[in-house]
Amino acid sequence: EMDGKLVLNVAVGTAAGVLAGAIAQRWLQGAPAILTRLDTSLAPSGPFHSAVRTGNLIFCSGCIALDPSTNTLVGGGDAMAEARQALANVKTVVEAAGSSMDRVVKATVFLQDMADSRRVDEVFAKAFQGSKPARSCVQVAGLPRGAKVEIEVVAVVDVW
Protein backbone atom coordinates (compact mmCIF):
# COMPACT_ATOMS: atom_id res chain seq x y z
CA GLU A 1 0.00 0.00 0.00
CA MET A 2 1.38 3.41 -1.02
CA ASP A 3 1.34 6.17 1.46
CA GLY A 4 -0.35 9.47 0.63
CA LYS A 5 2.88 11.47 0.68
CA LEU A 6 4.48 9.26 -2.01
CA VAL A 7 1.40 9.51 -4.24
CA LEU A 8 1.37 13.29 -3.83
CA ASN A 9 5.10 13.55 -4.68
CA VAL A 10 4.64 11.41 -7.81
CA ALA A 11 1.60 13.45 -8.87
CA VAL A 12 3.38 16.79 -8.34
CA GLY A 13 6.50 15.56 -10.16
CA THR A 14 4.45 14.29 -13.08
CA ALA A 15 2.46 17.52 -13.31
CA ALA A 16 5.67 19.60 -13.22
CA GLY A 17 7.21 17.47 -15.97
CA VAL A 18 4.11 17.75 -18.16
CA LEU A 19 3.97 21.51 -17.62
CA ALA A 20 7.68 21.97 -18.42
CA GLY A 21 7.29 19.85 -21.57
CA ALA A 22 4.23 21.81 -22.68
CA ILE A 23 6.04 25.14 -22.15
CA ALA A 24 9.14 23.94 -24.04
CA GLN A 25 7.03 22.58 -26.91
CA ARG A 26 5.04 25.80 -27.17
CA TRP A 27 8.24 27.87 -27.11
CA LEU A 28 9.85 25.76 -29.84
CA GLN A 29 6.71 25.89 -31.96
CA GLY A 30 6.97 29.66 -31.80
CA ALA A 31 10.58 29.67 -33.05
CA PRO A 32 9.68 29.67 -36.76
CA ALA A 33 7.89 32.97 -36.21
CA ILE A 34 11.31 34.66 -36.08
CA LEU A 35 11.48 36.43 -39.43
CA THR A 36 14.50 38.45 -40.51
CA ARG A 37 15.12 39.93 -43.92
CA LEU A 38 18.74 40.42 -44.94
CA ASP A 39 20.35 42.44 -47.67
CA THR A 40 24.09 42.31 -48.30
CA SER A 41 26.40 44.22 -50.60
CA LEU A 42 25.10 41.68 -53.13
CA ALA A 43 21.58 43.06 -52.69
CA PRO A 44 19.49 41.96 -55.62
CA SER A 45 18.06 44.60 -57.92
CA GLY A 46 14.46 43.62 -57.54
CA PRO A 47 11.54 43.39 -55.14
CA PHE A 48 13.18 40.77 -52.90
CA HIS A 49 15.92 40.33 -50.28
CA SER A 50 19.31 38.59 -50.38
CA ALA A 51 17.98 36.17 -47.77
CA VAL A 52 15.10 35.65 -45.38
CA ARG A 53 15.47 33.85 -42.07
CA THR A 54 12.58 32.14 -40.39
CA GLY A 55 13.23 30.08 -37.28
CA ASN A 56 16.47 28.24 -37.81
CA LEU A 57 16.38 28.31 -41.63
CA ILE A 58 17.87 30.85 -44.02
CA PHE A 59 16.39 30.99 -47.52
CA CYS A 60 18.88 32.67 -49.86
CA SER A 61 17.90 34.27 -53.15
CA GLY A 62 19.62 32.98 -56.25
CA CYS A 63 23.16 34.27 -56.84
CA ILE A 64 24.76 34.70 -60.23
CA ALA A 65 28.41 35.50 -60.96
CA LEU A 66 28.28 39.21 -60.15
CA ASP A 67 31.48 40.84 -58.98
CA PRO A 68 30.33 42.64 -55.81
CA SER A 69 32.71 45.55 -56.35
CA THR A 70 31.67 46.33 -59.95
CA ASN A 71 28.20 44.72 -60.10
CA THR A 72 29.16 43.18 -63.45
CA LEU A 73 28.93 39.57 -64.57
CA VAL A 74 32.30 37.78 -64.44
CA GLY A 75 33.50 34.56 -66.01
CA GLY A 76 33.46 35.49 -69.68
CA GLY A 77 30.76 32.94 -70.42
CA ASP A 78 32.67 30.06 -68.78
CA ALA A 79 30.26 28.07 -66.58
CA MET A 80 32.99 26.96 -64.15
CA ALA A 81 34.19 30.53 -63.58
CA GLU A 82 30.58 31.69 -63.15
CA ALA A 83 29.87 28.87 -60.69
CA ARG A 84 32.94 29.84 -58.63
CA GLN A 85 31.80 33.46 -58.34
CA ALA A 86 28.15 32.53 -57.77
CA LEU A 87 29.18 30.21 -54.92
CA ALA A 88 31.45 32.91 -53.45
CA ASN A 89 28.40 35.20 -53.49
CA VAL A 90 26.26 32.47 -51.88
CA LYS A 91 28.90 32.11 -49.15
CA THR A 92 28.85 35.86 -48.51
CA VAL A 93 25.06 35.85 -48.07
CA VAL A 94 25.00 32.67 -45.93
CA GLU A 95 27.73 33.99 -43.62
CA ALA A 96 26.09 37.44 -43.36
CA ALA A 97 22.95 35.62 -42.23
CA GLY A 98 24.86 33.87 -39.43
CA SER A 99 25.44 30.45 -40.99
CA SER A 100 28.15 28.78 -43.07
CA MET A 101 28.55 26.65 -46.17
CA ASP A 102 28.83 23.47 -44.11
CA ARG A 103 25.31 24.16 -42.77
CA VAL A 104 23.69 24.44 -46.19
CA VAL A 105 21.03 21.72 -46.36
CA LYS A 106 19.57 22.32 -49.84
CA ALA A 107 20.91 23.88 -53.02
CA THR A 108 19.27 24.49 -56.37
CA VAL A 109 21.48 25.05 -59.39
CA PHE A 110 19.99 26.66 -62.48
CA LEU A 111 21.96 26.18 -65.70
CA GLN A 112 21.54 27.81 -69.08
CA ASP A 113 22.87 24.58 -70.61
CA MET A 114 22.74 21.18 -68.89
CA ALA A 115 25.91 20.23 -70.78
CA ASP A 116 27.75 22.41 -68.22
CA SER A 117 26.55 20.32 -65.27
CA ARG A 118 29.69 18.16 -64.87
CA ARG A 119 32.00 21.16 -64.90
CA VAL A 120 29.77 23.06 -62.45
CA ASP A 121 29.68 19.93 -60.23
CA GLU A 122 33.48 20.12 -59.87
CA VAL A 123 33.22 23.65 -58.50
CA PHE A 124 30.19 22.75 -56.38
CA ALA A 125 32.03 19.80 -54.77
CA LYS A 126 34.93 22.07 -53.75
CA ALA A 127 32.57 24.66 -52.25
CA PHE A 128 30.86 22.02 -50.08
CA GLN A 129 33.88 19.92 -49.06
CA GLY A 130 32.70 17.13 -46.79
CA SER A 131 29.25 18.61 -46.22
CA LYS A 132 27.26 17.89 -49.35
CA PRO A 133 23.75 19.36 -49.25
CA ALA A 134 20.71 17.95 -51.00
CA ARG A 135 20.71 19.43 -54.51
CA SER A 136 18.58 19.92 -57.57
CA CYS A 137 20.01 20.96 -60.92
CA VAL A 138 17.80 22.16 -63.75
CA GLN A 139 18.22 23.73 -67.17
CA VAL A 140 16.34 26.97 -67.69
CA ALA A 141 15.49 29.08 -70.73
CA GLY A 142 17.28 32.14 -69.39
CA LEU A 143 18.98 33.68 -66.36
CA PRO A 144 19.45 37.30 -65.26
CA ARG A 145 22.03 39.31 -67.22
CA GLY A 146 22.65 36.37 -69.55
CA ALA A 147 24.36 34.33 -66.83
CA LYS A 148 25.04 30.64 -67.42
CA VAL A 149 24.72 29.66 -63.72
CA GLU A 150 22.52 30.71 -60.80
CA ILE A 151 22.59 29.04 -57.37
CA GLU A 152 20.20 29.39 -54.43
CA VAL A 153 20.45 27.65 -51.06
CA VAL A 154 18.70 26.95 -47.78
CA ALA A 155 20.96 26.87 -44.71
CA VAL A 156 20.51 26.16 -41.00
CA VAL A 157 21.33 28.71 -38.32
CA ASP A 158 21.04 28.48 -34.52
CA VAL A 159 17.73 29.79 -33.16
CA TRP A 160 19.25 31.13 -29.93
Image (cartoon, grey):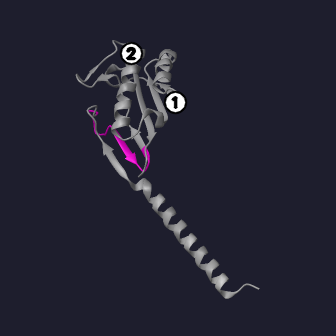
Magenta-span inclusion, residue 53: yes
Res. 74 in view: yes
Q: Position of residue 105 (x, y in %)?
A: 50, 37
Q: Position of residue 36 (x, y in %)?
A: 33, 48
Left or right side of 149 for 67 = left
In the image, which residues are magenta?
A: 44-57
Magenta-span inclusion, residue 94: no
Left or right side of 125 for 81 = left
Q: Which residue is mark 1?
A: 136
Give the residue drawn at x 46%, y 17%: 113
Residue 81, numbered label: 2
**Of 46 and 71, the residue lying toward us:** 71
Q: Is residue 38 above or below residue 127?
A: below
Q: CA distance from mark 2 to mark 1?
A: 20 Å
**Of 128 and 17, the residue lying toward us:** 17
- Mark 1, Cα crowd under 10 Å, few <14 / some 14-19 / many 20+, is few
**Nearest-to-viewer mark from 2 and 1:** 2
Give the residue drawn at x 57%, y 70%: 17
Q: Is residue 9 above or below residue 17?
A: below
Q: Position of residue 45 (x, y in %)?
A: 26, 33
